[in-house]
Image: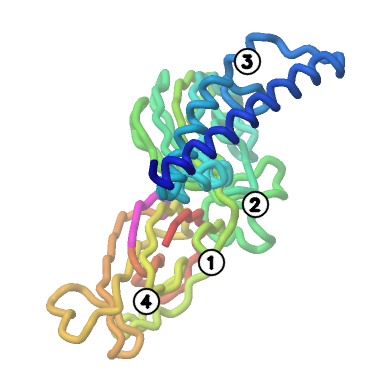
Amino acid sequence: MTSKYIMSLFLTSILLMFLVTMSIQTAAADKGSGSFIPKTRHKNVCGDQLCNVAGAKQRMEETMTRMAMGEKMPEKNMMQNKMTDTNMWKTKTGTLTSVQDPGVGHESHQIAIILAPSSKTYKGILTYDASENIQLVALHGPLAPGEDAGQKTWTPDGKTKFALTFIDPENSAGSWVFTGNALAVHTKNTTPFTVSYSVSYLENQPSDTVKTGTLTSVQDPGVGHESHQLAIILAPSDKTYTGVITYSASENIQLVALHGPLAPGEDAGQKTWTPDGKTKFALTFVDPENSMGTWIFSGNALAVHTKNTNPFTVSYSVVAEK
């Protein structure tokens, strides 16, 4: 008889003694405390309810046997609940009838609020089917005093202001990947509409890669870009960002992602950006020809840009990982 087999029998004996003791204690507690635990609860899994004893015994025996044979339990299993509790996807499905938009200046419009304003930053995907063509709305903020500097805004009272991303897909059914502090569906009509939707989203706490903010651009420090304006949202990093940005700017902008820095000789015809002529990054330069929108991106830096000499303002919500 091998030592591993003897160890397995020893551990199994301890397990059986433990289960018997727990059964006696549970029965005594049910009688002595005067509390009543319905029998149906014994069929449920562990939690605030009792365990199925036979199933628990089998699972524990299998686990202890594997441990006795020298097998390690994966750390992922031990940490799984903790990880999902701190950053869990949520899903809502429903049907709403719109109401009069409470925003100042929007009183003749209709709105259906899907995710209410929050201090956390939402990231998710919305799929919708409405009774008429609608517009998609994400809010960013609230803005600090003086941050409403040309970008579209929304306010319920003239004091608390949010930057407004307002997208018109010119349809009644579709999907939208978004970030923001609130999510709604809107029309410029006076009569109510109906929208059915499903939204899957995360609520993200602020961090160095999860931000809602407002920036005023500065002169682009890139060689050859001195007459341009730039607002850096995620600074250059040796790790790669992957995420979503939803934005509202005071004028049409271009979206920038940098890749690198490049090794010597790697700048071989692709667009590049350099602050000093030596350290070079490959440049992804996207012109959506709009001032409001959403971009799914990856790269070693993220920025918003114009080819104009005058500063612009951009409000945004970005949720990224690196």
Mark 3 burial class by Cα count in 10 Å: few <14, some 14-19, many 20+: some
Residue name at image x 60 percent, y 58 percent: 148
Inspect this view and state whether residue 181 appears: no
- Helix, strand or loop at mark 2: loop
Residue name at image x 55 percent, y 49 percent: 204
CB contact under 8 Å: marks 2 and 3: no
Most foreground residue, 89 or 152: 89
Label located before the other in sequence (3 or 4): 3
Most foreground residue, 23 or 178: 23
Q: Indicate yes or no whether the magenta region holds residue 294.
A: yes
Residue name at image x 42 percent, y 34 percent: 126
Label located before the other in sequence (1 or 4): 1
CA gap, disc 1 and disc 4: 16 Å
Extent of the magenta region: 291-298
Mark 2 burial class by Cα count in 10 Å: few <14, some 14-19, many 20+: many
35 to the left or right of 73: right
The residue tagged 3 is 42
Q: Quadrant of the N terminus?
A: top left
Q: Mark 3 or mark 4: which is in front?
A: 3
Q: Amino acid at mark 1?
A: Leu
CA gap, disc 3 and disc 4: 69 Å
Q: Mark 2 or mark 4: which is in front?
A: 2
Label located before the other in sequence (2 or 3): 3
Report the disc number at residue 142: 2
Q: Amino acid at mark 3?
A: His
Q: Main secondary structure of the magenta part?
A: strand
The residue tagged 4 is 228
The residue tagged 1 is 215
CA gap, disc 3 and disc 1: 57 Å
Indicate the quadrant where residue 46 lies.
Answer: top right
CA gap, disc 2 and disc 4: 29 Å
